[in-house]
Image (spheres, rainbow, N blue to C red):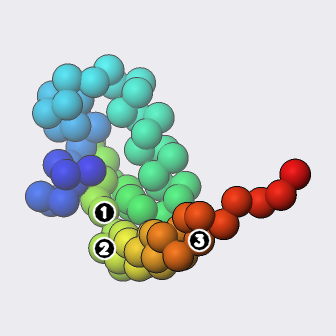
Amino acid sequence: MQILADGPATTSHLVVNTAAKQPNVSGHLKLLREAGVVTAEPRGRFTYYRLVPDVLQGAALHLADLAAQARTHSENFRTC
């Protein structure tokens, strides 16, 4: 995702920059689109993918809350 943080990129850009296989990159982009983290924008023959900053910020806040909750309850073992 760091590559997309630097601006919109095509699948080809991501393949070259990550050395990942194209089907793997496409699969990851599909999941990220479904999660709302990435949007797709057709431009001529190419589709550019970009991060959705507000979604990332919301996820970061949620993860921070989870971390705080986990820290608070890290010694609360459940009985069996």
Residue 35: percent from left, percent from top: 53, 59
Residue that label 2 marks: 53
Secondary structure of residue under mark 2: helix
In primary-sequence order, the first of circles 2 and 3 is: 2
Residue at image position (18%, 59%) is 5
Q: Is residue 56 left or right of residue 14?
A: right
| Front position in the image: 10 or 58 | 58
Residue at image position (59%, 64%) is 75
Residue 72: percent from left, percent from top: 53, 76
Residue that label 1 marks: 51
Residue 59: percent from left, percent from top: 44, 71
Disc 2 to disc 1: CB gap under 8 Å: yes
Disc 3 residue type?
His
Disc 2 residue type?
Pro
Indicate whether 55 appears above or below 33.
below
Residue that label 3 marks: 73
Secondary structure of residue under mark 1: strand
